[in-house]
């Protein structure tokens, strides 16, 4: 047993940290987030160059053939700098096709995703707020030889940037998952403004988009299981970024508490400041443990994933929300300014909390899995 | 990262499980104590030379986890002897002291107690005042200790005294650790009743108690270092996690069997959420424990990470018992012996006993100071 990282994993983490320190300074992150597309294509190409877009893609298809522990490590570091861009979503699309696709499908989609030439994402949810398969109403109906898709997918990560979508549809044999290309006829994606400018969500409208048989990944019961697993993997990805972001917010605040002096003493000497900082440390250390374990079972023990991921995401959703608020509060007025970075973490916590399930949803799942 | 056991670890686990399957549940406590002693599980992590098991950290973790899962009784009955007196002796004891004290601890022949706290000295332990004055080959001890657990039953005490006055700001110098027989002349023990009705701790008064110099542990003035190193052994949270899991199971059973406002309480999403949250924190503690264990296995020193799980545990101890009462509606007020009492008032009892862990091992505020100052590097108050 070993709840530590291998040497290779440590190297990957160091590489990611170096890259982020050098390339993703906060002024740049702000600039990218405020740009038209909301992220830097140039930076995304560099990330692909480092092999991170292909982390979860088998070597035979141009990826690194690694697992969720590695993906989580990289996403944690990316999250720590609030780096905008479609890495998490491309990793998810790659994982979906690698796990569900036929050889031909893998050959067709994966090398370009691995190389970062195309951006991928998953489109599972719709507007009614339901998180499970029952919420899928967008239809795929038989017409001629193939299927035609109609409906609207919502809350899609990086929808506007994506070149291909792994989409959940309601077909004639029940649920189906398929790949829809962004430039196909009848497909349009729209970015929607959200509270956190370093993250992007949008909707995907399908208006008679054709779904050829070669693009279908799975159907029926298999598709339902795949939907749930993809949703859970999405939660792993978001939570990994939450660990990094919460940790960075905490470090920012600890640093400030050592420097800022009031009543003749550094404010970090007052227990009204130091105790919340200690509580944040406890919370972050704990959801980090829960997240690493979820990432490990995602690769090795898929059956344990549901419970592990729900615990991590539930705990993180509440804890990071508190970290975000305390970060502002412990800074005083400077924390309220647009110019200071504290607010960016608060906004990330508000994005991350509902994304791939909030704590109410995930604690209910923990209750059910725990026999209640 | 790999949570599976290696073949060697698995083999050890299998040996543990086989032994436990054969010997549990325990019918005869004495026989159990003798058997686990023969197996060298008492003092399992102590070196073989002093009679311990020479077990590795990992084996120790496996042993504790399997035992706790099966609700096995403790290994040996000399609780404080096994928890910190023995480790203190191993690190600081003379050859003669090791020979004199360790076998009886391992054989459960004695009970030890811990004389640290004083009426004016709690969290700020280093400010202790109980005096030890050298007189030839004895120390003469005068002063008072309080909250001394097991003092009414103990044979020996590990005692901290001040042998030199506090100099300047350095409270830590001048503290000396003595091993004192509780039947020594001049010791008086007065039990204190706690709010749950227990009488496990006591005041201990010392009037000219003569302690031979060869019962000093470590050098004169080195008592603080002895204490810190001994308390560092009060560490592995693995068995605590299993105990909390058992409590969680009991809480779930209570929730399954309980109706409030005419409905099963489990129909209330807030109740379900709360229990799921407890389960999640306990799992987080388990994983934190493994993460810290991995650090130790790699030879990195554990600094103050254990405070993380101590804080979780403190919160859970208070919250779980209190939450259980809120499920019970009007029956929540009744205790053992009352007809409406649920589960014979078990939860009422635990709602009064949490200070054992929450205050006894360093208060939550002190744990937060430790994290803030030692891990985060914030200035001391
Ligand atoms: C069940 C039980 C068993 C015990 N067994 C033993 C034993 O066997 N041997 C032994 O020597 N002692 C024993 N103790 C004593 C225990 O170690 C002390 O109670 C503990 O260290 C706290 O000290 P105190 O009770 O004097 O509280 P105090 O230190 O007076 O604290 C009172 C309150 O002030 C807070 N406080 C104190 N200092 C600070 C600070 N710097 N910052 C913020 N808050 C602060 C505390 O958190 C607490 O809330 C036992 C206690 C209990 C409850």
Image: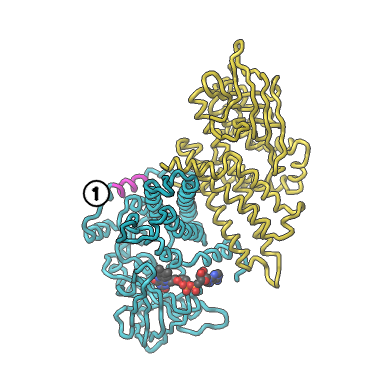
Chain colours: A yellow, B cyan
What residue does disc 1 label?
B22
Q: Is residue B43 left or right of residue A370?
A: left
**Foreground of the two, B153 or B85:** B153
Question: Label 1 lies in what chain?
Answer: B
**Residue B294 makes an appearance in the image:** no
Q: Residue at x 52, y 19 (%)?
A: A173
Q: Report x, y in % for residue A277.
A: 60, 60
Write down the quadrant of residue B202 in the picture: bottom left
Residue at the front extreme of this rendering: B262
**Foreground of the two, B300 or A103:** A103
**Residue A250 makes an appearance in the image:** yes
Q: Is residue B115 left or right of residue A358?
A: left
Q: Is residue B281 magenta?
A: no
Q: Is residue A299 left or right of residue A80?
A: left
Q: Is residue B324 left or right of residue B98?
A: right
The magenta segment = B8-17
**Foreground of the two, A258 or A139:** A139
SS assignment at label 1: helix
């Amino acid at each position: 047993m070993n709840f530590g990282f291998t040497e290779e994993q440590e190297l990957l983490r160091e590489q990611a940290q170096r890259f982020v320190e050098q390339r993703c300074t906060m002024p740049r992150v702000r600039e990218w987030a405020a740009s038209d597309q909301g992220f830097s294509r140039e930076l995304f190409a560099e990330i692909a160059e480092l092999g991170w877009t292909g982390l979860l893609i088998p070597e035979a298809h141009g990826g690194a053939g690694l697992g969720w522990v590695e993906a989580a490590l990289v996403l944690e570091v990316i999250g720590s700098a609030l780096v905008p861009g479609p890495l998490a979503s491309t990793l998810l699309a790659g994982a979906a096709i690698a796990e569900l696709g036929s050889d031909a499908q893998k050959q067709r989609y994966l090398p370009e995703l691995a190389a970062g030439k195309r951006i991928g994402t998953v489109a599972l949810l719709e507007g009614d707020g339901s998180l499970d398969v029952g919420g899928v109403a967008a239809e795929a109906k038989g017409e001629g030889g193939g299927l035609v898709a109609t409906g609207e997918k919502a809350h899609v990560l990086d929808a506007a940037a994506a070149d291909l979508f792994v989409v959940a549809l309601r077909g004639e044999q029940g649920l189906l998952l398929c790949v829809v290309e962004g430039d196909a006829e009848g497909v349009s994606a729209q970015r929607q403004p959200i509270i956190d400018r370093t993250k992007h969500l949008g909707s995907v409208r399908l208006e008679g988009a054709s779904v050829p048989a070669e693009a279908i990944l799975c159907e029926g019961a298999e598709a339902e299981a795949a939907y749930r697993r993809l949703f859970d993997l999405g939660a792993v990805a978001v939570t990994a970024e939450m660990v990094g972001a919460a940790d960075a917010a905490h470090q920012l605040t600890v640093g400030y508490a050592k420097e800022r002096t009031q009543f003749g003493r550094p404010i970090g000497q007052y227990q009204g400041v130091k105790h919340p900082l200690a509580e944040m440390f406890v919370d972050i250390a704990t959801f980090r443990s829960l997240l690493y374990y979820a990432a490990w079972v995602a690769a090795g023990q898929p059956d344990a994933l549901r419970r592990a991921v729900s615990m991590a995401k539930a705990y993180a959703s509440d804890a990071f929300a508190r970290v975000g608020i305390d970060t502002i509060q412990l800074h005083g007025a400077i924390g309220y300014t647009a110019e200071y970075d504290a607010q960016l973490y608060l906004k990330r916590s508000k994005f991350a909390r509902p994304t791939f399930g909030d704590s109410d949803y995930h604690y209910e799942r923990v209750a059910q899995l725990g026999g209640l | 990262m790999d949570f599976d056991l290696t073949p060697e670890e698995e083999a050890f686990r299998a040996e543990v499980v086989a032994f436990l399957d054969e010997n549990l549940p325990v019918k005869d406590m004495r026989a159990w104590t003798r058997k686990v002693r023969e197996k060298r599980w008492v003092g399992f992590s102590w070196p073989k030379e002093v009679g311990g098991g020479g077990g590795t950290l990992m084996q120790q973790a496996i042993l504790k986890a399997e035992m706790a899962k099966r609700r096995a009784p403790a290994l040996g009955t000399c609780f404080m002897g096994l928890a910190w007196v023995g480790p203190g002796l191993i690190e600081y004891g003379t050859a003669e002291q090791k020979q004199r004290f360790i076998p009886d601890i391992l054989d459960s022949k004695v009970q030890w107690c811990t004389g640290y706290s004083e009426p004016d000295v709690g969290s700020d332990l280093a400010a202790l005042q109980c005096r030890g004055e050298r007189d030839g080959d004895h120390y003469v001890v005068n002063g008072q200790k309080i909250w001394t657990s097991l003092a009414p039953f103990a044979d020996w005490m590990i005692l901290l005294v001040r042998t030199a006055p506090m100099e300047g700001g350095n409270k830590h110098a001048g503290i000396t650790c003595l091993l004192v027989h509780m039947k020594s002349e001049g010791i008086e023990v007065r039990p204190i009743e706690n709010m749950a009705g227990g009488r496990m701790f006591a005041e201990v008064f010392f009037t000219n108690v003569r302690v031979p110099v060869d019962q000093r542990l470590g050098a004169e003035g080195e008592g603080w270092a002895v204490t810190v190193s001994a308390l560092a052994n009060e560490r592995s949270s693995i068995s605590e996690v299993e105990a909390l899991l058992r409590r969680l199971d009991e809480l779930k059973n209570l929730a399954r069997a309980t109706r409030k406002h005419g409905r099963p309480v489990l129909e209330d999403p807030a109740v379900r959420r709360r229990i799921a949250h407890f389960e999640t924190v306990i799992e987080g503690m388990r994983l934190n424990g493994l993460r810290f264990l991995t650090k130790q296995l790699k030879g990195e020193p554990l600094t103050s990470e254990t405070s993380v799980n101590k804080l979780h545990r403190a919160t859970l101890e208070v919250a779980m018992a209190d939450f259980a009462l809120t499920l019970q509606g009007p029956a929540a007020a009744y205790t053992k012996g009352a007809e409406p009492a649920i589960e014979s008032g078990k939860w009422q009892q635990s709602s009064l006993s949490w200070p054992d862990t929450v205050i006894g091992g360093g208060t939550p505020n002190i744990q937060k100071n430790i994290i803030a100052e030692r891990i985060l590097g914030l200035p001391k108050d």
